[in-house]
Amino acid sequence: MAAAPIKVLVVDDSAFARKVLRECLSAAGLEVVGIAHDGLEALEMISALSPDVITLDLVMPNLDGLGVLRALAGKPAPRVVVVSMSDSDSMLGMAALQEGAFEVVHKPTALAVSQLYEIGDKLVEVVRAAALSPLRTAAEAVAVAGPVTLSKLSTTRELVVIGASTGGPQALTHLMAALPANFPVAVALVLHIPPGYTAALARRLDEICALEVLEAAEGLELKVGRVIVARAGRHLKLIRRAGGLQCKLDVFPVEALHRPAVDVLFQTAAEVAGAHTLGVVLTGMGDDGLAGARAIGVAGGLVLTESESSCVVYGMPRVVMEAGLSAGQAPIERMAEEIIRFL
C-alpha cells in the first residue's frame, strides 16, 4: 500500500505567494489541504484539517506568524516551516525558530515575485523532512538549563568548531546556554540558514550565553571567551596570523552545496589547529561535515556527534557516526558536558 501523501496547509497573506507555494508543493506530490490568508484563519483550518505541515508567512494581518506559533505551543500541532523574506524578517524569523518552527525557507522580496518558483525544490525538501521529524512542542524546543560547571581550566584543545543545519537554532540555544563563562577554548560555528539571519542569531545567542557571541567578520580574532557565528552567504575559513587565529570570509569553493559549509570550517580548523581541534556535528539534513570530520581525524583531532534522540533530523551526525569518525555522542541537553569531557 502506498504511503499517504503529506498534508500541507499554506498560510500567506499574498495571493501570488499562495498560488506559487501550492503549485510547487502539489507538483511534488504533496497534498495541499488548504490555503489560509492570515493567522486566525490558519488556526481554524489547522483544527479542521489536521495538516502534517504548515508553511507559514510571518507578517500577516489579524494574527501574525509568531502569534500562530504561540497559539500552538504545548499542543499536538503540525510541524511549521516558515517561508519568509529574510531581508525584512530576520529577527522575526529567529524568533519563530526559537518558538519551535522547523526551518526557515527564504522567500524573495515582493519585487522579485517571479523568483518564488525558484524556492520550490528547497521548500519540498524541507516540508518532507519536517513531516518525518520527531514532533517537539515549542516549550521542549527552547527550554534550556543554565551553564554547566567547569572545574578543568587547562586543556590541550585550541579550538572547538561546531556544525548544524535543520533544528540548529534550537540545538545551539541549548548548547550555548550551557557553556560556562570560564570555557577555556575559542569556538566557531556554522549553521545552514538564509542570508540575513546570522546577525540576529548571533545577537540571540549572545543574550543567553555566558561567552561573547559575534557574527564573523574578516580578520576577527578567535580567542578564549568568544564564539564566532559564520556569516550566511560566505564560507568561514580560519587562518593563523601573528600567532593567533583569525576569520577569513570567502565565497570559494563556489561548488559547495552550502555557503557557509561545515566542511570548509572543519577542514581549515584541522589545517591551523591540527590535533588541538575538537569538532561537534549537530542536527541537520545531508552530509555536510563528513569530509571536515575526516580531516579533523586525520590531523589527530576528535569529533563528537549529537545523539539521534535529540536531533530534529538525524542526518549530518548519522553519516559521521557511520563513517566511524565520532569519538563520542550525547543528546543536545548533555552536549556541553561531553565537550568539556573531551577538552
Image (cartoon, rainbow, N blue to C red):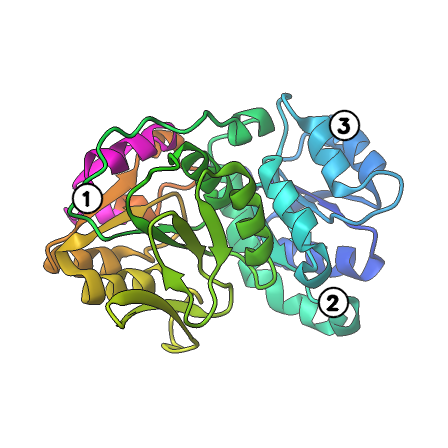
Q: Position of residue 156 (x, y in %)?
A: 15, 47
Of the residues shown, which amino acid type is indicated by label 2? Thr
Q: Which residue is mark 3?
A: 48
Q: Position of residue 260 (x, y in %)?
A: 43, 65
Quadrant including the N terminus: top left
Q: Which of pointers 1 and 2 lies earlier in the amino acid sequence?
A: 2
Q: Which residue is mark 2?
A: 109
**Which numbered marker is on residue 326?**
1
- 64 sits to left or right of 218: right
**Residue at x 68% of width, y 29% of height:** 50
Magenta range is 319-343
- What residue occupies the far top of the structure in this picture? 75
Of the residues shown, which amino acid type is indicated by label 3? Ala
Q: Nearer the viewer, residue 128 or 293?
A: 293
Q: Position of residue 77 (x, y in %)?
A: 63, 28
**Residue at x 58% of width, y 25% of height:** 139
Position of residue 216 relative to residue 68, above or below, is below
Q: Position of residue 89 (x, y in %)?
A: 71, 55
**Which numbered marker is on residue 295?**
none
